Image (tube, rainbow, N blue to C red):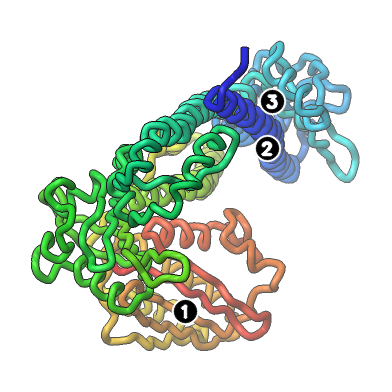
Amino acid sequence: MRLGIRGREVLVVSILTLMVVTGTTAMHLARLSRVVVEEAGRQAELTARQVYAQASRTLARTTGVVPHEALRRDRDLRGVLEAAVGYSPHLLYAVVADPEGRIVLHTQSAREGTLAPAHPTLTSLLDLDALQRFAALYGAAQTYEYVLPLRLNEAPFGSIRLGVSSTLLGRELAESLRESLVLAGVALVLAWVLAMALARVVLRPIRALAGQVDRLRRGEFDATVPALGGDEFQELSAQLGRLGQELKADRLAGLGDQAPLQHVVDQFEDAVILLNGVRQVLFFNRAAGEVIGRPLEAAMGEPLESLLPPGHPLGSLVAQVSAQGAGSRNVTLTLLAAGREREVLASVFPVAEPRRLAVGLVVILKDLESVKTVQSLVSYSAKLAALGRLTSGVAHEVRNPLNAMMIHLELLRERLGEASGDVRQSLEVIGGEIRRLDRVVQGFLRFVRPQELALKRLDVNALLASVVALLEAEWGSRGVRFVLETAPDVPDLSADEELLRQAFLNILQNAGQAMPKGGVVTLRTESDQRAVRVTIADEGVGITPGDLDKVFRLYFTTKPGGTGIGLALVYRIVQLHDGTVEIRSEPGRGTTVTVTLPVR
């Protein structure tokens, strides 16, 4: 069976779309599976090192006890193992084993004292190709281990083993796999529908031209003949060649008379208006009808200015382009459409015939609401991603003092010895509250939600002055001096005062810590119609070029005893306010931090 133009076009578009979608989906999933396994490996390595650090501290403070027994008795070490499995979405168990493979500590205490079974390493999963890795993740349940050797006095002492479940890794991929398959299906359906629509649009002029040829020979020039080409048009091309001298219809007027074009353009979300050389309406689509306020039949032939209210911004823009002869693109206008005001991007440009002056104008109005909706979704996703990166860091900072409190509580119990019943009861209450707070932190990690800003009117200059007043007493004794150079015309912001206060406190604390011998920290504000910029410059030791790109990463720090959380929190807070933060630094000459916040 021979396929016509319509069938061949649909077939070719569908096959090409299937090939592209299949290839891109396969590459995306292969890359995604590797990223998931690598991320699981990085989390396992971080967890193993935390366990290693706790085990080392236990062994260092233990005397007169068999090391393995000391590890087994250490509640803090056991708590670290249990927390590691509880927080991780991939880990099945955490084990501390001796050199012979016998389990010393296990998150499942019943297995302690038994031999640890052998499992393949997580690295072996990365060494597989994409198909083998998918088969491993979605096949029979398999456990892969990350192993970190444990040493005592520079001699092998055992190992830390973390079990990662292939089933849990596969579940993490499942959502992305479903999304990819749904997108692939939608793309195929859309490609088929688009091919059918394009074929229909292409074939419609052919059928229309067959009926127009006889009328054109009789001199009825009420239709514009489109440019012809291709095998299907050869028969008509011979007839239209004899009539070429008789066709004088204006192309723009013809566009207004073509029902197929009107049907297609009416589906556009953007408003489209065609005008002739004296700015009379030739055609507009349904979206433009909401702006003009009349149907096309009642507006054709009327000047655009007479259809719009006096002083209408669209009428002024069209008159300006018509007078200057040069197009104007993406001008923001506020128009009244369908009884409500809305912002649009207006583009007006002249249309000219070859070697002739401009014969008309084309007006295109793009609704900004859909663009803003997409921008809002992207901004919200970025905020959620930033919050997710920092949640683990915040919980880590809370749990550190809890661990210290629990350790010192145990020391108090030992030192008090046979204390009175009231004292023992008080210690039990304190211990119970510490454990309860630890559970609260764990619950927070499981059910964390994006933070809502408490927006209110905020004077940035006043906020900086209060932050400086708070820090002067602490840093003045160390030779650090703060200088405020605030612009008096800085507009107020709509922002969360407490979050911005925390951000600027973190920046100024870093500036003071970067000047161990003292110096000057300069705070400067400036603004334009769109944003307020706060610049904080110190005279400290500076940041090396290799570290400059890493300063906003969680846990990255170059200061002894630093947590690596301060600037990450700054980045998160500024991003939640749709702002930006930039850092410039020269080693030995100081660092400059610029925070830019939009004026709402």
At a point 48% along the width and 50% down the height, the residue shown is 386
Residue 401 in sight: no
Label 3 belongs to which residue? Answer: 164
Label 2 belongs to which residue? Answer: 35
Residue 536's label in the rendered image is 1
Cα–Cα span, label 1 and label 2: 38 Å
**Secondary structure under the numbered disc 1 in the rendered image:** strand
**Secondary structure under the numbered disc 3 in the rendered image:** strand
Q: Is residue 270 above or below residue 333?
A: above
At a point 51% along the width and 82% down the height, the residue shown is 537
Cα–Cα span, label 3 and label 1: 45 Å
| Amino acid tagged 3 | Val
Quarter of the picture containing the C terminus is: bottom left
At a point 68% along the width and 42% down the height, the residue shown is 46
Cα–Cα span, label 3 and label 2: 15 Å
Image coordinates for residue 82, horizontal then vertical, percent = 59, 28
**Considering only order in the chain, which callout, 2 or 3, is on the residue closer to the N terminus?**
2
| Amino acid tagged 1 | Ile
